[in-house]
Image (spheres, rainbow, N blue to C red):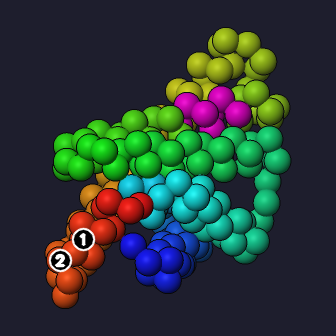
Amino acid sequence: MKIQTKLIIASLLVITGVLFRLIPHAANMTPLVAIALVAGVYLGRPYALAVPFLAMIIGDLFIGFYDWPVMLAVYGSLALVGYLGFALKEYNRLETRAMMSVVASTVFFLITNWAVWQFSSMYAASLAGLIESYTLALPFYRSALVGDLFFTMSLFAAFELALYLSPRYSFRKEALANS
């Protein structure tokens, strides 16, 4: 895939991520995990990191920044999800993509809620406090799972449709082979 095409797609993904963070939405129901997965699969390793990072940083400029250790956990979780997307490229099946979306949601949930427990004063610094932080976050996890599955399947479907409708079939092979 040409660098110009990758930049256009990356820009559209960043804009989508920022817009969905800014418009009213259910808690934790944004396309950022899906964007990281899609960037990893179709755009390659550098984009798997850069695209969700840019969407987050631009969104945070508008929404506001928060406790930096928790922010690092959020950004780091999205980077890890991008690398999961890069690994997912080898397994181009619907079931695998859906499973990876669930894995990505779970990884994000575990890391970010651990960070909230570890670096904030919201919970006791004990195993009971950690369990409480995960327990109280379960409704957010449910929203994240639903949103991540929806956005992951939607973005992958949109990308595959665009590749299928591409006037050059070789573009599709090139996009999957060179990312």
Horizontal arrangement in the rendering, residue 17 relative to residue 71 (left or right)? left
Residue segment shown in magenta: 109-115
- Expressed as whole percent of the image width and height from the top left, the position of residue 85 reads 42, 49
Task: From the viewer's side, name the closer residue of 95 and 139.
Answer: 95
Residue drawn at (50%, 35%) of the image:
107
Which residue bears the numbered disc 1? 172
Q: Is disc 2 placed on a helix, strand or loop?
A: helix
**Image coords of residue 75 (percent x, y):** 66, 50
- Whether 126 is drawn above or below 167: the answer is above
- In the rendered view of the protein, which quadrant contains the N terminus? bottom left
Left or right: 76 as drawn, with respect to 14: right
Question: What is the number of the mark on residue 169?
Answer: 2
Alpha-carbon neighbours of circle 1 within 10 Å: few (<14), some, or many (≥20)?
some
Evaluate if marks 2 and 1 touch, with contact meaning CB atoms under 8 Å apart.
Answer: yes
In this view, the residue in front, 146 or 35, is 35
Q: Residue at x 59, y 19 (%)?
A: 131
Q: Is residue 75 above or below residue 167?
A: above
Q: Amino acid at mark 2?
A: Tyr
Instruction: Judge whether residue 141 can be spotted in this image.
Output: yes
What type of secondary structure mainly makes up the magenta span?
helix
Q: Position of residue 21 (x, y in %)?
A: 57, 68
* Distance (Cα) linking label 2 and label 1: 6 Å
* Furthest residue in direction bottom, as rendered: 167
Q: Residue at x 76, y 20 (%)?
A: 124
Q: Looking at the image, which residue is at 77% across and 65% down?
A: 64
Mark 1 element type: helix
Query: Quadrant of the rendered structure where residue 152 is?
Result: bottom left
- Under mark 1, the amino acid is Arg
Looking at the picture, does residue 112 appear above or below residue 166? above
